[in-house]
């Protein structure tokens, strides 16, 4: 089985958030900076991109601070977005799936329940859900249904030896984390199962909870799967950029 390396690539931010955004219903006065990231897994001649970031048009409409096209950030690692073959979409919030059209050759791996919710469930059009989704990228994924470019996963599934998608609900209906076989054992790219490292360390979720009981079970599952506590990576912590070896501008090697 290949040994993989895992990289975080910042594509927007920093953004100021209150503590209560990052630690649900706590720390109202605290202020913290976060970033938007995509991730990249490399090893054995394979490249898997985890999440897509936001496409330039949406970033312009939203006036995202510090935005760089995720395809340009990938180029700093000599990865051409239009040649990437494998993209895991952890969940269908705009900051994670809003750049699917930057990857015209990719197969996208999404949990079926996550996909069905955003594409088919009328609740997804209600304000709190609409607020965090992106109609353009959701429609793009829907246009791929039935082709080999969209793989709808049903629960925990391996996408290649040493890379497993783990169903991890809580923040969304069917968010998926990615378990990666690395030199240090299994690392977990947990995306927004934790916005910051503190969520894992303090056993406390962040915001946009669709299933709080499920979220706590997700923490049990991901802790069990990770080979060490410091191999659990969150979705938005600025420390992923600041505390790890930089390999290119705004690109760090997590493990
Ligand atoms: Zn997010």
Image (cartoon, helix red, strand yellow):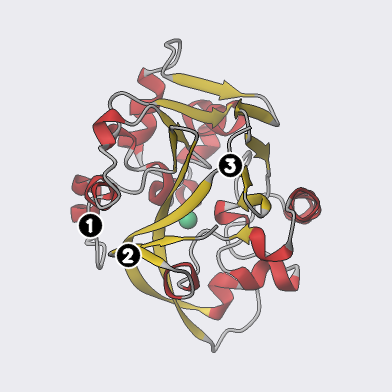
Mark 2 neighbour class, 10 Å CA radius: few under 14, some 14 to 19, many 20 or more: some
Within 10 angstroms of label 1, few (less than 14), some, or many (20 or more) residues? Answer: some
Q: What residue is rendered at 71% in x and 71% in y?
A: 201
Q: CA distance from mark 1 to mark 2?
A: 10 Å
Q: Quadrant of residue 79?
A: top left
Tell me where residue 103 appears, x and y as whole percent.
Answer: 30, 32
Quarter of the picture containing the N terminus is top right
**For mark 1, what is the residue?**
68
Indicate if the residue with disc 3 has its beta carbon within 8 Å of ligand 1.
Answer: no
Among the 4 quarters of the image, the one containing residue 114: top right
Would residue 73 appear left or right of 30 to someone viewing this image? Answer: left
Instruction: Measure the alpha-carbon separation of dots 3 and 2.
Output: 23 Å
Q: Which residue is mark 3?
A: 3
- Left or right: where 136 falls relative to 176: left
Q: Nearer the viewer, mark 3 or mark 2?
A: 3
User: What is the distance, in whole Å, between disc 3 and disc 1 at their CAs?
Assistant: 29 Å
Image vertical order of residue 69 relative to residue 1, above or below:
below
Label 3 Cα crowd, 10 Å radius (few <14 / some 14-19 / many 20+) = some
Task: Determine whether, in the image, residue 100 is placed left or right of residue 80.
Answer: right
Circle nearer the N terminus (1, 2): 1
User: Helix or strand or loop: what does disc 3 sit on?
Assistant: loop
Say which of marks 1 and 2 sits in front: 2
Residue at mark 2: C-beta within 8 A of ligand 1: no
The residue beneath circle 2 is 250
């Amino acid at each position: 089985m290949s040994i993989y390396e895992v990289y975080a690539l910042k594509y927007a931010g920093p953004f100021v958030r209150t503590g209560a955004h990052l630690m649900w219903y706590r720390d109202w006065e605290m202020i913290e900076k976060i970033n938007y990231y995509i991730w990249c897994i490399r090893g054995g001649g394979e490249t898997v991109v985890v999440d897509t970031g936001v496409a330039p048009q949406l970033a312009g409409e939203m006036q995202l601070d510090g935005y760089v096209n995720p395809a340009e950030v990938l180029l700093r690692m000599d990865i051409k977005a239009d040649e990437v073959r494998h993209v895991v979409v952890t969940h269908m919030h705009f900051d994670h799936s809003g750049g699917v059209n930057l990857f015209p050759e990719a197969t996208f791996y999404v949990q079926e329940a996550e996909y069905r919710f955003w594409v088919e469930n009328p609740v997804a059009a209600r304000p709190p859900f609409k607020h965090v989704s992106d109609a353009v990228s959701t429609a793009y994924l829907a246009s791929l249904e039935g082709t080999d470019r969209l793989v709808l996963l049903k629960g925990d599934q391996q996408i290649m030896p040493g890379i497993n998608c783990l169903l991890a609900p809580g923040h969304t209906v069917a968010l998926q984390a990615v378990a990666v076989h690395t030199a240090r054992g299994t690392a977990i790219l947990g995306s927004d199962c934790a916005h910051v490292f503190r969520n894992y360390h303090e056993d406390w979720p962040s915001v946009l909870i669709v299933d709080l009981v499920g979220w706590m079970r997700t923490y049990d599952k991901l802790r069990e799967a990770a080979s060490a506590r410091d191999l659990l990576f969150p979705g938005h912590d600025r420390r992923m950029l600041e505390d790890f070896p930089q390999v290119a501008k705004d690109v760090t090697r997590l493990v």
